[in-house]
Image (spheres, rainbow, N blue to C red):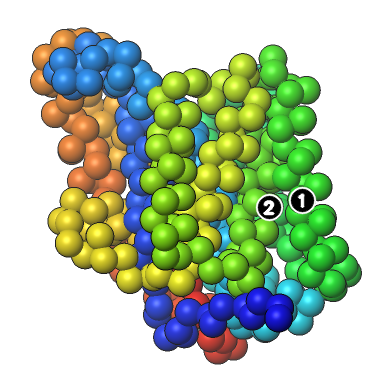
C-alpha cells in the first residue's frame, strides 16, 4: 500500500511556525555578531576570558553561515506557501507570486535607501558610497541602481564594499533573482519531478562554482551561482515535507545529531575558500530541521524558555533586522570609532547589547509601523486575498 502524504499543517490567517522563527532567530543573531566583531573585535575582550580568543573568533568569523540558513529557510517557506495556496507548483499564479514578493521586499528596501542616502547627504561619512573616479553623488546613484536591480553582489565584485550599509543587500539580490525564475520554472516544467530535478541541478552547481572561484571572495561567497544552492535545497525540502513526515523517534534521534554536526562545522572550519562543501553541508542540515519542523509549528521548547522566546522574537523580525542593523552599527562606529576603545576590558563588550537592543528596537518600530502595514495593504491591492501557511 503506498504511503499517503501527511496532512498539511492547519491554515490560519497569521499562522507562524515557531520552530522556524527560532531557527531564523539563530541565523540573524549569528550575522549580527559577525558584523559587530568586524567593527569591534572581541578577541581580547572580557568575553574571550569565558570563551577563549579562539572561541570568540570561531563564532564571529563564520557569520555568513547565518545567511546560508536564511537562504534555505526562504526557499522552504516560499515553496510551502505556494503548495498551500495552489495545491501544486504548476498551478502557481505568477502575477500573485511577484506581487507578494514586491509587497514584502520593496517597502523596506526603499526605506533603507532613503535612510542611507539621507545620512550620506547629511555628511555622515560611513554611509557615503566611495568609488574611485566618481563623485559622491554619482557613486551613490550607482549603488542605488545596484540595490534596485538586485545586483548588489555584482556591484561588490566590481567596487568592493563601496557602501557600508548597503552591502547586506547582496543576499537580497541573490534571493530575488532566484525568485524571478521560480514561477517560470514551475509553469514551464509543470511536473513536480522535473521541477525537483531542476532544483537538484542548481544545488549541485553551487559547490563546483565555489570550487572554481576559490581565489575570488566575491565569486566564492556572493555570486548568484555560489548561493542559489541553499535556496534550491530549501525548495526541495518543502516538497519532501509534503510526502514525508519526520517526527517521533526518528526526529528525536536525528535532530540532535544534525544540530551537533552543524555546530561542529560552524566552529571547526572557516566558511572561506578552503571549505568548498561547508555551505552545502550547512544547507542540508537546515533542510532536515525544517522538514522536522513542518508539522510541529508550536515550538514548546521556545514556550518554556525565556531566552529562546527572545531568539524567536528576533526571528520574526529577521528581515528588518538584517536590512537595518548596519544603520545602528554605522552610527556607533561614527560616535565611537574602534581606535577610541581599548582592545581589552568591558568597553567593547558593553557596546554589544547596545547594538543588539538598538537594532531590535529599530527593526520592531519599522515592522509595526511601516513594513507590515504596507505588506498587508500591497498584498490586498496587488495580489488579492490568498490563504497562507507560514509567513515568508
- Vertical placement of residue 140 versus 189, above or below: above
- Vertical placement of residue 17 versus 162, above or below: below
| Rendered location of residue 103, percent (x, y) | 54, 70
Relative to 203, 285 lies left or right: left
**Viewer-side residue, 71 vs 139:** 71
Give the class, few, some or many, for how many residues have Cα within 10 Å of label 1's Cα (few <14, many ≥20). Answer: some
Give the class, few, some or many, for how many residues have Cα within 10 Å of label 2's Cα (few <14, many ≥20). Answer: many
Quarter of the figure that contains the N terminus: bottom right
Kindly give the residue lying farthest to the front in the view shown: 1
Q: Residue at x 42, y 29 (%)?
A: 264
Q: Residue at x 39, y 46 (%)?
A: 256
Residue annotated with mark 1: 200
Residue annotated with mark 2: 232
| Rendered location of residue 373, percent (x, y) | 40, 75
Q: Residue at x 63, y 71 (%)?
A: 243
Q: Nearer the viewer, mark 1 or mark 2?
A: 1
Label 1: element kind = helix
Q: Residue at x 45, y 65 (%)?
A: 247
Q: Quadrant of residue 86?
A: bottom right
Q: Please report contact status of discs 1 and 2: CB closer than 8 Å, yes or no.
A: yes
Kindly give the residue lying farthest to the left in the view shown: 346
Q: Quadrant of residue 317?
A: bottom left
Kindly give the residue lying farthest to the bottom in the view shown: 385
Relative to 337, 267 lies left or right: right
Q: Quadrant of residue 248?
A: bottom left
Q: Kindly tell me whether residue 141 is visible in this rendering.
A: no
Label 2: element kind = helix
| Rendered location of residue 354, percent (x, y) | 18, 38
| Rendered location of residue 85, percent (x, y) | 61, 82
Mark 1 to mark 2 CA distance (whole Å) = 7 Å
Amino acid at each position: 500500500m503506498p504511503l499517503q502524504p501527511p496532512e498539511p499543517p492547519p491554515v490560519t490567517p497569521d499562522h507562524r511556525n515557531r520552530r522556524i522563527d527560532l531557527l531564523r532567530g539563530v541565523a540573524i543573531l549569528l550575522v549580527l555578531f559577525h558584523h559587530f566583531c568586524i567593527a569591534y573585535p572581541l578577541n581580547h575582550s572580557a568575553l574571550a576570558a569565558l570563551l577563549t580568543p579562539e572561541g570568540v573568533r570561531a563564532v564571529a568569523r563564520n557569520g555568513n553561515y547565518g545567511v546560508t540558513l536564511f537562504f534555505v529557510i526562504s526557499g522552504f517557506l516560499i515553496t510551502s506557501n505556494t503548495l498551500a495556496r495552489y495545491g501544486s507548483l504548476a498551478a502557481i499564479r505568477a502575477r500573485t507570486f511577484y506581487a507578494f514578493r514586491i509587497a514584502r521586499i520593496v517597502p523596506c528596501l526603499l526605506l533603507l535607501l532613503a535612510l542611507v542616502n539621507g545620512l550620506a547627504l547629511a555628511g555622515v561619512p560611513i554611509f557615503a558610497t566611495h568609488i574611485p573616479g566618481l563623485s559622491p553623488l554619482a557613486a551613490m546613484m550607482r549603488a542605488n541602481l545596484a540595490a534596485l536591480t538586485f545586483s548588489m553582489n555584482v556591484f561588490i565584485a566590481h567596487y568592493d564594499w563601496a557602501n557600508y550599509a548597503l552591502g547586506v543587500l547582496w543576499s537580497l539580490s541573490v534571493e530575488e533573482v532566484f525568485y524571478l525564475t521560480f514561477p517560470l520554472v514551475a509553469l514551464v516544467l509543470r511536473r513536480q519531478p522535473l521541477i525537483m530535478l531542476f532544483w537538484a541541478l542548481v544545488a549541485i552547481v553551487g559547490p563546483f562554482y565555489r570550487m572554481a572561484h576559490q581565489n575570488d571572495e566575491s565569486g566564492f561567497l556572493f555570486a548568484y551561482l555560489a548561493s542559489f544552492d541553499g535556496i534550491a535545497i530549501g525548495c526541495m525540502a518543502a516538497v519532501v515535507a509534503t510526502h514525508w513526515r519526520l517526527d517521533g523517534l526518528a526526529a528525536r534521534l536525528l535532530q540532535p545529531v544534525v544540530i551537533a554536526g552543524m555546530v561542529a562545522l560552524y566552529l571547526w572550519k572557516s566558511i572561506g575558500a578552503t571549505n568548498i562543501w561547508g555551505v552545502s553541508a550547512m544547507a542540508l542540515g537546515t533542510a532536515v530541521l525544517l522538514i522536522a519542523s513542518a508539522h510541529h509549528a508550536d515550538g514548546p521548547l521556545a514556550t518554556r524558555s525565556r531566552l529562546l522566546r527572545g531568539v524567536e522574537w528576533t526571528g520574526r523580525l529577521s528581515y528588518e533586522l538584517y536590512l537595518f542593523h548596519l544603520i545602528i552599527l554605522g552610527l556607533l562606529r561614527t560616535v565611537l570609532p574602534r581606535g577610541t576603545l581599548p582592545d581589552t576590558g568591558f568597553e567593547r563588550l558593553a557596546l554589544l547589547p547596545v547594538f543588539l537592543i538598538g537594532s531590535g528596537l529599530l527593526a520592531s518600530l519599522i515592522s509595526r509601523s511601516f513594513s507590515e502595514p504596507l505588506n498587508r495593504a500591497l498584498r490586498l491591492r496587488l495580489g488579492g486575498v490568498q490563504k497562507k501557511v507560514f509567513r515568508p
